[in-house]
Image (tube, grey):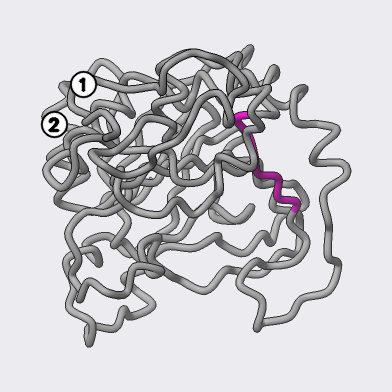
Amino acid sequence: MSESIPQFSPSDAQKDMAAGLRQAGCAVITGLTDEGQRQELRAELADHLAEAEFKTTEDSADFYPGRTRRVTALVTRSKTAQTLILDPCIKALCDEMLLPNCERHQLHVTAALEVGPGARAQTLHREEDPFAFFPLPRPNLIVATMWAISDFTADNGATLLVPGSHLWPEDRVHTPDEVVSAEMPAGSVLLWLGGTLHGAGANISKDSRYGVILTYSLGWLRQEENQFLDVPPEMAQQLSPELLEAIGYPMYNALGVYDPRVALGSEAPPVTTASHRDPI
C-alpha cells in the first residue's frame, strides 16, 4: 500500500477516516468483508459475468479497456451487493463528505469488474467529470468505493490514483511519479472522492482482478446508472425502505414526484422521509 493513501481498519475512529479521505482524496479500509460474503457475491454474479462482453482487442480510444468483464445493475442481481450498498461505515463517510451539499445522498452507479490478464491501464479521470458545470476544484459531488473481492496488486491492475488531485485547479496536470497503485488485500475497500484522478491499472499478471464499484452522489444530481430501469417495479416492491431510499425512490424536496399506483402497482404512498416535501 502506498504511504500516500491513508489506511484504516473498521475499528478506527470515523473522524480519523473522514480526515484522511478529506485530505488525500482517497483511503483504504481493510477487513470490511469476509471470505463467505465474497464467495456469495461471486456465486450470485457468476452467470452474469460469464455472459458479459469480453473484448480481446484494445482500442485506446475506448474509455473502458478490453479484456475486462463488466456487469451493472447489482441491486437486482446480487443480495450481497445490496448489503454492501448499505454498509454503515461507508454510509457514515458519505454523510461526512456529501451531506454538507445535500439533504440526502443516493446510489450513483454499481458494477462488478473482472480485469483480465493483458488489460491496459485506463485513462485517468474524475468520477464527477460529467458535471462540468462546476469549475475545478469542485465541491464534493460523489464518493466512490471499490470493494476488493480478490487481492489488488500493482501487477494485476489495482486502481491507480493521484492523491490530492481533488484539490487541484483545472490547469494542474499530474506527473507520472504522482500516480500510485491502491494495492490492498481481498476484503478491503478503497474510497475516493469524485474529484480525485483515478483509473484501472494495467493487468500484467496471469490472474484476473475482481472488484465491485459502488458510488454515491448528491441527492439532487442525475445518477450515472439509471436505477429506475435497472431495478424494475416488481423488484422495487421487495426492497427495504433503506435500500429504496438509497437508490433514489424518495422525493428530494420537490424533485422526483411519482404516483406509486403507476410506478409500483400499489396503493402505498410514495417513499418519503421527514425532510421531504409532499407533492402538491
Q: Which residue is mark 2?
A: 16
Mark 2, Cα crowd under 10 Å, few <14 / some 14-19 / many 20+, is: few
- The amino acid type of the residue labelled 1 equals Asp
Q: Which residue is mark 1?
A: 12
The quadrant of the image that shows the C terminus is: top left
- The amino acid type of the residue labelled 2 equals Asp
Is 166 displayed left or right of 185 in the figure? left
Give the residues in magenta.
69-75
Where residue 32 appears, x then y in whole percent?
43, 21
Asked where in the image residue 215 lies, by quadrant, the reply is: top left
Is 29 displayed left or right of 84 in the figure? left
The residue depicted at 41 percent of the width and 23 percent of the height is 270
* Labels 2 & 1 near each other (Cβ < 8 A): yes
- Measured along the vertical axis of the image, is residue 8 above or below residue 52? above
- Measured along the vertical axis of the image, is residue 153 above or below residue 82? below
Q: Is residue 74 magenta?
A: yes
Where residue 276 appears, x then y in whole percent?
22, 29
Front-most of 62 and 153?
A: 62
Where residue 164 appears, x then y in whole percent?
21, 62
Distance of label 2 from label 1 (alpha carbons): 7 Å
Asked where in the image residue 125 lies, by quadrant, the reply is: bottom left
The residue depicted at 11 percent of the width and 29 percent of the height is 15
Q: Secondary structure at mark 2?
A: helix
- Measured along the vertical axis of the image, is residue 99 above or below residue 201? above
